Amino acid sequence: MAEAKKSMEKKAMDMMAKLKGWIGGITELGLAIIALGVVLQIIFGTGVIFMPIDILGNVIGFVKVLGAEGLVGLVALWILWGIYSKK
């Protein structure tokens, strides 16, 4: 009975580790796409064919919102950085 419980716990932990890996991979992919979009919009402007949204404008707007919030914006940025850098 105890062996079966330990086996189920190990399977659950393995599944959680796989899920964490998938989420980390998707996050890295998203950040790479954002970085690519920023670079392409700097080089070619907002007329990049396969990126119909204004990534650079969204990033600038996000930074402006955080800057307008003062200390709360800095704390939010600190929390986001802590979440991202915690690998």
Image (tube, grey):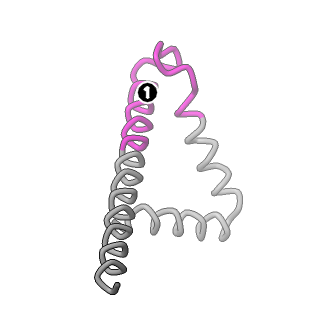
Q: Residue 61 sits in which quadrant?
A: top right
Is residue 7 inside the magenta stretch? no
62 shown above or below 2: above
Q: Residue 26 sits in which quadrant?
A: top left
Residue at 37% from the left image edge and 41% from the top image edge: 29
Q: What stretch is highlighted in magenta?
A: 29-57
Residue at 46% from the left image edge and 25% from the top image edge: 41
74 shown above or below 56: below
Q: Judge the density around disc 1: few (<14), some (14-19), many (≥20) Cα neighbours within 10 Å.
A: few
Q: Nearer the viewer, residue 36 or 41?
A: 36
The residue singled out by tag 1 in the image is 42
Q: Where in the figure is residue 28, as x and y percent of width and height?
A: 36, 47
Is residue 35 inside the magenta stretch? yes
47 shown above or below 4: above
Q: Residue 17 sits in which quadrant?
A: bottom left
**Quarter occupied by the N terminus:** bottom left
Residue at 40% from the left image edge and 38% from the top image edge: 35
49 shown above or below 35: above
